[in-house]
Image (cartoon, grey):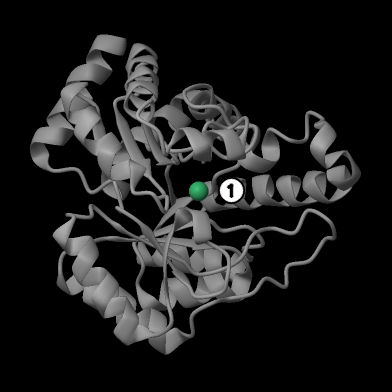
């Protein structure tokens, strides 16, 4: 199994506590334990969405020892003053981005994670979500990354933002809440991989104290997203499994299986979910031939 969207620095339970722990010596042990659990459950490939403390780079070293394929962005890139502080480093403009990209290259990023938009608002239903980079900036960022052979993972919600990401040629759309039919067709046409991350909302609809006043909005957005994923699948969009594990209420390892169940709820058969998680996961994680061989070897062992 492949999980294309996790945050190894977080634990899905207590954001503050996990952030504190990630600054201590303990973090290596914690990550190693998580990797052993992932492996025990047949999950051998993980792609990280980033953190500002570069824990995902430390995790990549431990992963190698634990025979887990772990892909790290080193740090996500976000726009100064906007959402994304805990995910990486901010840039003011494209010149700033160039400097940051040189640093990320020196740290051997596996993919570029760009925070293009804000989050889903749980307090009121609105698909009007801020977009932090303009088209020219995003085009520049994607082009530099591609020129250097680095795939682009775009965190984006809203129809407008998703359309911009598709037009600029990102490799994967992460989340993609409030997507419309037009973008679903475009993704299918352009072979862009969609990682819809259903678990962060899906795991809240079972009832959660922290968000009990927002349950109507969460239910509605989650159900709409399920319908979009179902439509995307029927139209041939390449959907990959990404749980957003580490995010509130999405625990590592269990989150991957939660995501399988949410994808099944969107109308995809279980065996198709597993197959597409592997096939599209291989592409999303940009695995090389040896890594692909390793995935199939382990997959056979699981069957
Ligand atoms: Zn994430």
290 versus 152 height, above or below: above
Q: Which quadrant is the C terminus positioned in?
A: top left
For the point 55% across and 44% down, the residue is 197
Residue 154 falls in which quadrant of the image?
bottom left
The front one of 191 and 137 is 137
The answer to whether 219 appears left or right of 18 in the picture is right
90 versus 212 height, above or below: below
For the point 31% across and 74% down, the residue is 142
211 versus 171 height, above or below: above
The front one of 302 and 197 is 197
Q: Can I make out residue 245 in this image?
A: no
Name the secondary structure under disc 1: helix
For the point 32% across and 27% down, the residue is 28
Residue 113 falls in which quadrant of the image?
bottom left
Q: Where is residue 157? Give x, y as percent.
A: 59, 63
The answer to whether 273 appears left or right of 26 in the picture is right
Q: Where is residue 300? Give x, y as percent.
A: 24, 15
Q: Which quadrant is the N terminus positioned in?
A: top left
Residue that sits furthest to the front in the current view: 24
For the point 78% across and 35% down, the residue is 205
Q: Where is residue 213? Give x, y as percent.
A: 90, 44
Residue that sits furthest to the left in the current view: 290
Residue at which label 1 appears: 229
Q: Can I make out residue 117 in this image?
A: yes
């Amino acid at each position: 199994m492949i999980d294309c969207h996790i945050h190894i620095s977080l634990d899905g339970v207590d954001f503050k506590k996990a952030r504190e722990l990630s600054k201590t010596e303990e973090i290596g042990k914690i990550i190693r334990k998580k990797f052993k659990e992932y492996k025990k459950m047949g999950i051998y490939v993980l792609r990280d969405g980033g953190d500002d403390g570069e824990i995902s780079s430390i995790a990549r070293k431990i992963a190698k020892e634990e025979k887990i394929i772990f892909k790290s962005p080193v740090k996500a890139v976000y726009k100064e003053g906007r959402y994304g502080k805990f995910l990486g480093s901010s840039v003011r403009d494209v010149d700033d981005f160039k400097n940051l990209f040189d640093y990320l290259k020196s740290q051997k990023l596996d993919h570029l994670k760009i925070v293009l938009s804000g989050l889903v608002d749980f307090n009121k239903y609105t698909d009007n979500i801020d977009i932090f980079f303009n088209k020219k900036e995003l085009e520049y960022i994607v082009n530099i990354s591609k020129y250097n052979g680095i795939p682009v993972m775009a965190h984006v919600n809203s129809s407008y933002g998703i359309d911009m990401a598709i037009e600029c040629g990102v490799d994967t759309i992460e989340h993609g809440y409030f997507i419309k039919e037009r973008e679903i067709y475009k993704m299918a046409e352009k072979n862009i991989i969609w990682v819809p991350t259903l678990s962060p909302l899906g795991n809240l609809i079972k009832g959660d104290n922290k968000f009990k006043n927002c349950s109507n909005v969460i239910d509605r957005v989650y159900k709409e997203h399920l319908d979009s994923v179902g439509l995307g699948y029927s139209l041939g969009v390449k959907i990959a499994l990404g749980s957003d594990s580490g995010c509130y209420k999405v625990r590592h390892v269990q989150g991957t299986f939660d995501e399988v169940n949410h994808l099944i709820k969107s109308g995809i058969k279980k065996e198709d979910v597993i197959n597409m998680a592997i096939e599209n996961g291989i592409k999303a994680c940009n695995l090389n031939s040896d890594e692909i061989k390793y995935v199939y070897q382990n997959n056979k062992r699981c069957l």
